[in-house]
Image (tube, rainbow, N blue to C red):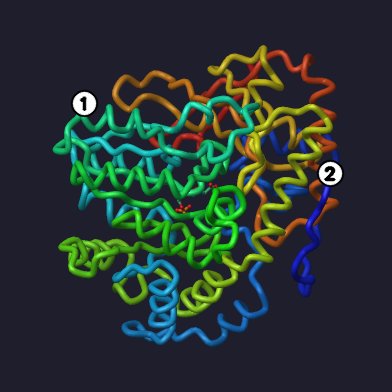
Amino acid sequence: IKYFPEPFRIKSVEPLRMLSREEREARLVAAKYNLFGLKGEDCYIDLLTDSGTGAMSAEQWAGIMRGDEAYAGAASYDKLVGTARDIFGYDYVQPVHQGRAAEKVLFPLLLSSGKVAISNMFFDTTRAHVELAGARCIDCVVEAARRPADRASFKGNMDVARLEQLLREYGPERVGLIVMTITNNSAGGQPVSMRNLREVSALAGRYGIPVCIDAARYAENAYFIQRDETGYQDVPISRIVREMFSHADFFTMSAKKDAIVNMGGLLGVRDGASGLIQGIKANCISYEGFYTYGGLSGRDMEALAIGLREGIDENYLRYRIGQMEYLGGLLDQADIAYQAPAGGHGIFVDAAALLPHIHYTEYPGQVLAIELYREAGIRSCDIGSYMLGNDPDTGEQLQASFEFTRLAIPRRVYTQAHLDVVAEALAEIKHRAHQIRRGYRITWEPPILRHFQSSLEPI
Ligand code: F0G
């Protein structure tokens, strides 16, 4: 299996330590089997998320020193907005402190009670902000996404035929927004094709419905388009990005992923004459901070401006996606099923296939995540029914389309040998999977985004 060598060398290191098996067991009990309750230092390899966990470059650290901390009109703000406008081709760019802040600022301007928002798939916080605005979410991903073993390309796509049906059914007055999540995180970091973006945008245009790109992993998405979509092999990533964003009216972005910063986000509006810009500024000033910093310090904006460019570097992206393919290849050898082909920011192990005897109400994705910590101190997370939660109207446990355990790979952080450790641990668990008889029940949960906080116990 090929491993693309790192296009960087290591200048600063953080020691890792591995707790004993008994210590790990005690930590699980203390965390009430919620992996968000563990301390980072108690995790040997932390694959909980690729969000804010990347390693900044020497250039970004230098930018931290240059950051301009003026309250209004900082030079770092101008640099960030100039860079973002150049990359995305949008007229207005609003810095915010992270992705969900952009959602909180934008969504109430477009959604209200009685409306629906349709997406190729909402991620958890995006879903929460649609619901907090009073609206309801409809996921509309292509069927191939529901078959982890089906190695189709662009499994993150919107099902355009079904979208058209939904638009007819609900009518343009009830559909407040279409959200294109690129890459499609919940479906396994699977990419969305340019053709799909083009078709959705044309359809939305016919019904007069705005399209918002949820852009957390836009650069990885662009790389997949260049690699796999006919006609894009010789098009530079920067041009692909421009074209992708030309098919939407807004974007919300968690910059903690592809822009490789520890904290930051952006909200973009394509048309500078949009009547929403005043509302965006007003919401931003109320919730985030003055509109020339939006909850970020000047040094954060400086690092973000630099990270945006580094995140679309083709050598970096080849190495980055190469890590996922390498880990996926190791799992193929061990005959462990995952959302295939490998996605952009992690490997989503098919926990329902590994633990077929565990019912979705006992959370197979969470079971496997707990076992990985037990086995080797590896922290991951459930992307399945445990994360999806309950129906906001009936309170019933929803059944997710998949039961994944997500191994999210932080950017520029772990090496080939770390990935080997992860694959070996999974193979060990597969050997003893039949001994894992039951899952977990929730003993306490908050009403929204429960997976971050709830307590569990083994059944
Ligand atoms: N949209 C997508 C597709 C995301 O994956 C996330 C965060 C957000 C929006 C919200 O961004 O965290 O900066 O407020 N995803 C992280 C994850 C947390 O682990 O996948 P945020």
Badge 2: residue crowd in 10 Å (few <14, some 14–19, many ≥20): some
Mark 1 falls on what kind of element? Answer: helix
Q: Disc 2 residue type?
A: Val
Q: Which residue is mark 1?
A: 169
- Where's residue 44, x and y in %? 78, 49
Q: Is mark 2 within 8 Å of ligand 1?
A: no
The front one of 370 and 198 is: 198
Q: Which mark is residue 421?
A: 2
In this picture, residue 384 sits left or right of residue 445: right
- Tell me which numbered mark, 1 or 2, is placed earlier along the sequence: 1
Q: Are marks 1 and 2 in contact (CB under 8 Å)?
A: no
SS at mark 2? helix
From the top left corner, tell me how far across and down residue 388 is, in percent.
46, 30
> Residue at point 85% right, 41% down?
20
On the image, the x and y values in percent for residue 384 come to 54, 29
Q: Residue at x 21, y 49 (%)?
A: 110
Q: Quadrant of the N terminus?
A: top right
Q: Quadrant of residue 342?
A: top right
Query: Residue 11: x and y, percent?
Result: 78, 75
Label 1 to label 2: alpha-carbon separation = 49 Å
Which residue sits at x=25%, y=49%? 210
Quadrant containing the C terminus in the rendered view: top right
Q: Is residue 18 left or right of residue 387?
A: right
Q: Quadrant of residue 295?
A: bottom left
Q: Is residue 213 above or below residue 373?
A: below
**For the residue marked with disc 1, what is the amino acid?**
Glu
